[in-house]
Image (tube, rainbow, N blue to C red):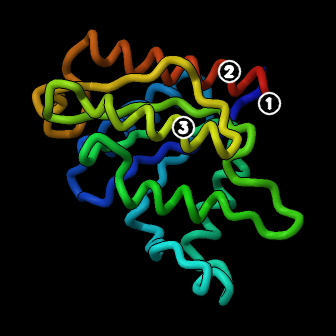
Amino acid sequence: MTTPKIIALAGSLRKDSFNQKLINEAARFALESGAEVEVIKLADLAIPMFDEDLEAQGTPAGVQQLKDKLRAADGILLASPEYNGSITAVLKNAIDWASRTEQGAEPAFANKVTALYAASPGGLGGLRGLNHVRDILSGIGSLVLANQLAVPAIHTLLDDNGRITDPATAEKVAGLAQQLVSVASKLK
């Protein structure tokens, strides 16, 4: 089995994002499972709102960086906050930019194994938005794992360092990350 390269990201810009903390934990478990893992923060990329007129002037640097990292990856750990029952604008915008293909380049999400996570202080844990994320990513060629994880009441499950304190929740987060690593290793 070869070492898969995994990109981990959350669809949030918020400094203390629960979904960023969740994806950091998933990344840690993927690393422990033998993967090479890089966590990307969308806030660090300064991705502008998608606009074909802007795209015609050239791909913004943060967008190109995201595309390059996704293209080099074998798998993606992705956490999506739920806003009004759907995907966040920042995540949809990043996906829209990354899905644009320059002549001769591979689509950034094509054939990338993706594991979906969501977290929320609410009782559903962001579950309703995951179907929208699944539809979007499947439509642009990502191989989205059937299993997904929504973590309700996340604010009660994290310590001051962002680590999951509930063993059952940690086991679920780790299990999905391990599944991603396993499938990405086999497809590499």
Corner quadrant of residue 15: bottom left
Mark 2 and mark 1 lie on one chain; the one further toward the N terminus is 2
Residue type of the residue flagged with mark 3: Asp
- Callout 1 amino acid: Lys
Residue 38 location (% of width, % of height): 54, 47
**Could you say which quadrant of the image residue 13 lies in?**
bottom left
Left or right, residue 45 beside residue 110: left
Q: Is residue 129 left or right of residue 34?
A: left
Q: Quick check: can you spot residue 19? A: no
Q: Quadrant of residue 75?
A: top right
Q: Mark 1 Cα within 10 Å, few/some/many (few <14, many 20+)? A: some
Give, as a three-letter code, the residue at label 2: Val
**Is residue 93 depicted above or below 175 in this figure?**
below
Q: Residue at x 64, y 55 (%)?
A: 69
Extreme residue toward the right, this view: 104
Extreme residue toward the top, this view? 168
Q: Which residue is mark 2?
A: 183
Closest to the observer, 156 or 58:
58
Which numbered disc covers residue 188? 1
Give whichever of discs 3 and 1 has the lower sequence position: 3
Asked whether the residues under the numbered discs 3 and 1 touch, taking CB atoms below 8 Å apart as contact, a structural biologist would say no
Whole-number angstrom distance, CA of label 2 to CA of label 3 = 20 Å
